[in-house]
Amino acid sequence: MYALEKKTHRFLSMGRITLPSSQEEITRLSVEIAHEAATLFAMRGKTIQEEAERCRILLMACQTSIYIPNRFERAQTVLARAEKVLPQLDNSPLKVSLLTWCFAEAEEKGLLDEAKAIIASWNPKKRTAEQTAAIKELALFEETIQ
C-alpha cells in the first residue's frame, strides 16, 4: 500500500517536469499506479484508520492515473467509503489528509473548511511532523485551485 503512495507522490512531483524525456517515465508510472490500485480497490481496512488510509491512497491514485478503468465510478465508490470513516476519525493528520484528497476528487468546499478547522485546533508550537506534512499537503491543493 505504501509503495503505491510513494509512486503517486513521485508522479505528482514529475508533473512539474516538462522535458520530453520525462513523458515516457510519467506514462510508465501512471500505468503502474493503475495496476497497483486495481488490487487495493477491492480490499478493506481492518480498522477505521486502515480503511481511511486505503481511501486516501486510492483517491491519490485516482487523481494521478488516467489508466484506471472506470476511474470516475471507482473514485465515487472510494468517496462513499471515506464518507463512512471520516466521522469516526479523531482530528488527526490522517483525517486532514483524507479530507484533502476527498476535496481533490469531489471539489466540495466544506471538506477544506473541515480540514482547516482541524488544523486550527492543533497547537502551532507543538506540531508533529505528520501534522506539518498534512498542512503542507492542504496548502498545495489550495495553491492549485486559486
Image (tube, helix red, strand yellow):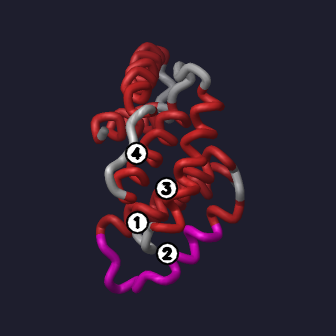
Mark nearer the N terminus (2 vs 4): 4
Q: Secondary structure at mark 1?
A: helix
Real-space Cα separation, disc 2 to disc 4, in angstroms: 22 Å
CA–CA distance in space, label 1 to label 4: 15 Å
In the image, what residue type sits under mark 4? Arg
Label 2, label 1: how far apart the Cα atoms are: 8 Å
Residue 98: numbered disc:
3
Mark closer to the chain start, 1 or 3 = 1
Is tag 3's residue or tag 2's residue first in the polypeptide sequence? 3
**Residue range of the region highlighted in magenta in the rendering:** 113-128
Q: Which residue is mark 1?
A: 93
- Can residue 21 be seen here? no
Image location (x, y in percent) of residue 67: 53, 19
User: CA gap, disc 3 to disc 4?
Assistant: 10 Å
Amino acid of disc 1:
Pro
Give me the C-alpha separation between circle 1 and circle 3: 8 Å
Amino acid type of disc 3? Leu
* Residue that carries the numbered disc 2 in the rendered image: 119
Up-down: is 63 above or below 136?
Answer: above
